Image (spheres, rainbow, N blue to C red):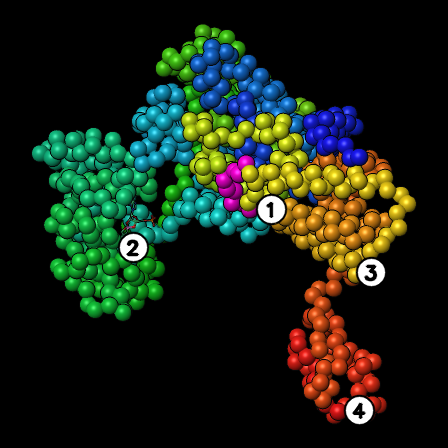
Amino acid sequence: MTENYNHTEIEKKWQDKWDADELYRSVIDESRPKHYALTMLPYPSGDLHIGHWYAMTPSDARARYMRMNGFNVLFPIGFDSFGLPAEGAAIKNNIHPKKWTYANIERMRGQLRSMGAMFDWEREAVSSDESYYRWSEWFFIQLYKNGLAYRKMSPVDWCPSCNTTLAREQVWGDDRHCERCGTPVIKKDLDQWFFRTTNYADEMLKFEDIDWPQHVRTLQTNWIGRSEGASVIFKTEVGDHDMEVFTTRPDTLWGATFMVLSPEHPLVEVVSTEDKKAEIEAYKDEAARQSDIEREATDKEKTGVFTGGYAINPVNDERIPIWIADYVLMSYGTGAIMAVPAHDERDFEFARKFGLEVRVVIQPDDMEALDGETMEASVPAKGQMVNSGPLTGTPGDQSVVKAIEFIGEKGTGKKAVNYKLRDWLISRQRYWGSPIPMIHCEKCGWNPVPEDELPITLPEDVEWLPTGESPLKLHPTWKHVKCPECDGKAVRETDTMDTFMCSSWYHLRYLSPEYHEGPFDQTEYDYWMPVDIYTGGIEHATMHLMYTRFFHKALRDMGITKGDEPMSQLRNQGMVLGEDHDKMSKSKGNVIAPDALVDKYGADVVRAYLMFFSRWDMGGPWNSQGIEGTVRWMRRVWTIFNETANVTDVTPTCSAETKKSLRLKLHETLKSVTFDFENVGFNTIISSLMELMNEIYKARSEGAVGTPEWDETLDIYLRMLAPVAPHIAEELWQVMGNEYSIHTQAWPKVDESAIVVNEITMGVQVNGKVRDRITVAADADDDTVKAAALASENVQKFLEGKEPRKVIVIPGRLVNIVK
Ligand code: ANZ
Ligand code: ZN
């Protein structure tokens, strides 16, 4: 009798044993190639959800596969444990953010262990530990010393409910609400710390040396938003101030019929005439209430106000009216534009609405002569320059270059590149984050905390209830320190760092979490870095995945890291949706809780089903019927191994054909599973294993038990199963009388000779009558087929010893022999 498959007992037993034996400890071993498999670290929200399982368990299977292939694999885990939710929970439940966070970490460690993943817990890193954030602080100082951290007064997006600034990516939707709490975001002027990510904009556009999905590359490329063009200086008529514009079309300079300033532009005050001031103020107020997205929308009715002022066009000294309009954003380029209505869509709509001149200066070759008075839409295409003073007649393929040369000679403009990417705003007016290690003295200005005084630790006695002020600022003593330069009275920076700072380098802390001489141990770095495969959610395409690249490159230039990129390969999973095909949420009641599933089915089934139910990079809706299919498969696996484990003296009764086709299926499966593991294609791994299981049952019914082919199949089956379902594979490995552990076994090798791909049978005719059938490889050439046909005994008989006059091969079907 077969024992029942008691997953709870089996999984617990092996998890404990693996732990006790330190089976997944990864230490430097120069004799083996290394493989650093990194899965995105979780935020300790308190509950591991199905999304974590979906990210981590297939990644674990891949890491295990690499290990079986002879790699020394590092697969670490940790917690991204600073951040706003801890303070939210603190306020709600009156519990210290630190206490809440560490209690959650404790609980989640247990949940993570239930996955049966090959995490090396000795390398766990927790970003809110003093031993960790000490180095976040240290990195801040290095960035500061290298001119990559600076302080600037700037209008920021502020969430009045969370009481903090938000990065551009944390402001969501057309109504611009806070990503965390949904409150509408307002603008506020604050002194903030920034990292100069824009220094690396061009380099971050290069992806040649890394294997990252095209989708992520496109998102990052668009986010960086590089535009080439020119910067041109127009002078204001009154006061001769510089009004710099960025344009991608310097070839249209002669067509500028008005200028537009962003309502927030500092020159608005200067150029506007007294009679316009009231109207302008009203317009500015209105613009401030809209989001950049709303303001930029092309389908929006254009609005604006004439300032009463004029600028001088540097190419022809023409006097041009200056307007303000909300479609020009202060946050892009210089916040001022030259408007060329004949060739720019938004400028055209604006000109028509306010009756401004539309002047054609570009004539594309393939279009009828354009007329500014009558045209119904702008013509943005390049073409020959017309109406453009000395440059009239310049062909479209040279127009931009010639125009830049022209303004260059006049000293009024030059080639320029512009980016949508902004510097990274680091400051958060919050408590639960890494302190920014800077000190301000009235006399000496800003200075970093001396490195030997690190870490600056967070005080525990803080008021976390909302006061409208940052808890560190409110603290009575914490901020008061001596100036590192003059020893006089000074104050600490009371803002803390954006948590994306902590997660920009956690892959380095994993290398040596106990190391205290630096952020990481160089020996470990040299062995393990770069990360060979990074897996996680696509939602991190533009923030985390750009910050971590920036960070690595900045550190590289300081001689701290090596190589140009931190992560050689990236693969993203999709999202597990609720059964109703909606995003899971507590309010919709469609949340799938992994703990309950593990209780009911076991971790192995949950792992396998998550790999099976959809393409990993696509995700899809959960299906509670679907998982039953995986359960049945796992039971069949359990049963067949147990039933045949102790069979010793059985006489195989199957045919040679059965043995051959079992081996064929086995090695075909091994080949495709190997291919799929290499290419991170998890769903087909499981379906292949299911199919092979059917073949195994069939072979058993045909009497294959006891044959060498049978033994080989079972052995290879378990090795293929081991990365997917590590517990059951370990148990069955033992049941089969093998030596512990299956997880230190080698991945099996495909026997190509067992896979004669697609044999076909062809008829052989002699003088029009079928005399025999031959079996050949489908891809056999004509000569091979002819030789096989002529070798047939029957054919020889009918040839009666004569040489055939003709042999014709009809590929795939027939050989025709003429006697
Ligand atoms: C004159 C012109 C003529 C333009 C023409 C376009 C076509 P990208 O590709 O996005 O970089 N622009 C510049 N700064 C702006 C701002 N702060 N707010 C709104 N629009 C702004 O686009 C650059 C073009 O967008 C610039 O080139 C400018 O209009 C406009 F036939 O200048 B152009
Ligand atoms: Zn000082």
- Circle on res. 683: 1
Of the numbered discs 4 and 2, the one sitting upstream in the chain is 2
Q: Which of the pair 295/809 is nearer the observer? A: 809
Q: Is residue 405 above or below residue 29?
A: below
The image quadrant where one finds the N terminus is: top right
Assess disc 4: are there few (<14), some (14-19) or many (≥20) residues with their C-alpha within 10 Å of its C-alpha.
few
Which structural element holds mark 3? Answer: helix
Disc 4/disc 2 C-alpha distance (Å): 83 Å
Residue drawn at x 42%, y 29% is 588
Which structural element holds mark 1? Answer: helix
Bounds of the magenta segment: 615-624
Rendered location of residue 493, percent (x, y): 45, 19
Q: Quadrant of residue 551?
A: top right
> Taking the image as drawn, is residue 39 in sight?
no
Rendered location of residue 569, percent (x, y): 59, 45
Q: Which of the pair 110/38 is nearer the observer? A: 110
- Circle on res. 803: 4
Of the numbered discs 3 and 2, the one sitting upstream in the chain is 2
